Amino acid sequence: MLLLAEPAQLLPARQQMAFTLMFHIILVPLGVALPTLMLIAHFKGLRRNDSVALTLARRWSHAAGLTFAVGAASGTVLSFEMGLLWPGLTGRFGEVFGLPFAIEGVAFFLEAILVAIYIYGWRRLRPWTHFWLGVPIPFVALAGALSIISANAWLNMPAGFTVASDGQITDIDPAAAIFNKALPYEYSHFVLAAYMAAGFTVASVYVVGWLRGRRDRYHRLGILIPFTVAAALTPVQFVVGDLAAVAIYQDQPAKFAAMEVVTNSGSHQPEILYGRYDSATNTVTGGIRIPGLNSWLSGGSTSTYVQGLDAFPVDDRPSNVNIVHWAFDTMVGIASVLILLALWYAIAYWRRRGVPKSKLFLWCAAGAGALTYVAVEAGWIVTEVGRQPWIVYNVLRTSDAVTDADGVWVSFTVVVVLYLALAAGTVAVLRAMSRRWRSSDSTVDTDAVYGPRPPVDAAAAAPAANGEEVSR
């Protein structure tokens, strides 16, 4: 009966938004974190006159440019979808949370300019000038991410406005909307996830080459730089994730009840791993139960009281508890596995100062990037599906914000086709770049003004010694 009462456009609008978000989120970690990885390699190359590190930096900059361009295309579609699919949200609350989107637009254009300067600077700029012009890129990327996460956090913890008795929005405070209560934990959680996803994914490319016998220094640095960054942040992410869960327990109890599939309110709540929730009976079957752990994680004691799904009207509960719960358990499970992998890496590197030799470790490292992206997608499912049926938590229902225009299924189909074509083109270009790089000497990049160079004899090098930029 509930489904019959919902607007016909609600399902296709949700499906289209979910599809575009899940596609776009694949590119965001690379846009946020890959510039940092390339600058680490760049700094190492200049500081130690390391041609291999400079080669990695230049090639990663090309990959960053490509993923930035594709991410710009998919992100632009998302911006239009906000207005076209959810006019009830943007029309009523646009003045409240619209400023972050304007900030993101400025950050986007600034990042595009800086990325272009950096990529073309390999052939035109002095070494350290080129490096320092690239340094702002990660910070601009973080500023853009901050603006978008701020808007999403506002949907979860709305602030900066008052709803008058006639339903009008008054007393608008854009600063309070931007710096809402959910921003600190959502932003830190996402940024760490982005760096982990990018680090493990980039490293996995070189791990696969290592497993295929390419045991040169190029692949060694290609593994060590991004994997070290990702591994170092993994335990930090676990702590931040726990703090975020506690904050959700306090601020969004219905979402927390779905995440942990707490059916009946009370203390001494067990931690239930997976299992299947039955909305008709408000019970869970199957799964692994750890007595009292959920209450202890929520408040530091097994006697901590946790609100269950029974505390909320049926219409106010998350629309699909099983999806939210399974996504949350998947995210936490992957994070636990990655902590073990990071610890293994730390011990192995401390002992041998190089890439761990264990075949089992290498196979796990090769799959770490894909696993991290599964966790990222699962995290967004928890955030978005867990907030339902509200598009603005406890203020505006999703069904009241959706468009009443016809043809949403048609637009959804068109978006799917276009995005699949965009994905195929991106993969094809990345593979072509990879093949071209493999076909040449991985430590030589003769197109660059400085850095990667084929070896020269001393007699030929002497006349140019005074003017050679690489000596600076």
Image: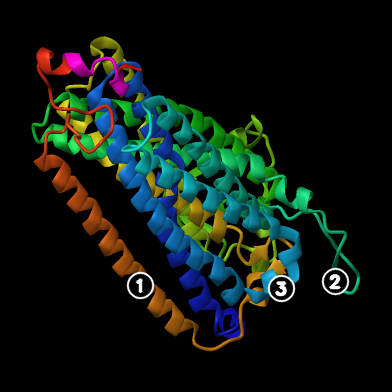
| Residue furthest right in the image | 165
Tag 2 or tag 1, which sits nearer the N-term? 2
Mark 2 vs mark 3, CA separation in Å: 11 Å
Q: Which residues are magenta?
A: 462-470
The reply to whether residue 223 is visible in this rendering is: no
Q: Are marks 2 and 3 in contact (CB under 8 Å)?
A: no
Rendering coords of residue 347 (x, y %): 31, 16
**Mark 3 Cα within 10 Å, few/some/many (few <14, many 20+)?**
few
For this rendering, which residue is in front, 179 or 110? 110
Front residue of 117 and 179: 117
Does 465 lie within the magenta span? yes
Residue beneath the point at 56% across and 54% down: 383
Which quadrant holds residue 129? Answer: top left
Question: Which one is earlier in the sequence, the residue at label 1 or at label 3?
Answer: 3
Q: Are marks 1 and 3 in contact (CB under 8 Å)?
A: no
Disc 2 element: loop
Report helix, strand or loop for mark 3: helix
Disc 1/disc 2 C-alpha distance (Å): 39 Å
Q: What's the distance in space between the residues labelled 1 and 3, CA to CA?
A: 28 Å
Q: Amino acid at mark 1?
A: Leu
Residue 168 is marked as 2
The residue that appears at 48% across and 59% down in the rendered structure is: 322
**Number of labelled discs?**
3
Instruction: Name the disc covering residue 91, or none.
Output: 3
In the image, which disc is placed on residue 418? 1
126 lies above or below 159:
above
Q: Residue type at mark 3?
A: Gly
Mark identifier at residue 38: none
Tell me residue 324's x, y (percent): 50, 56
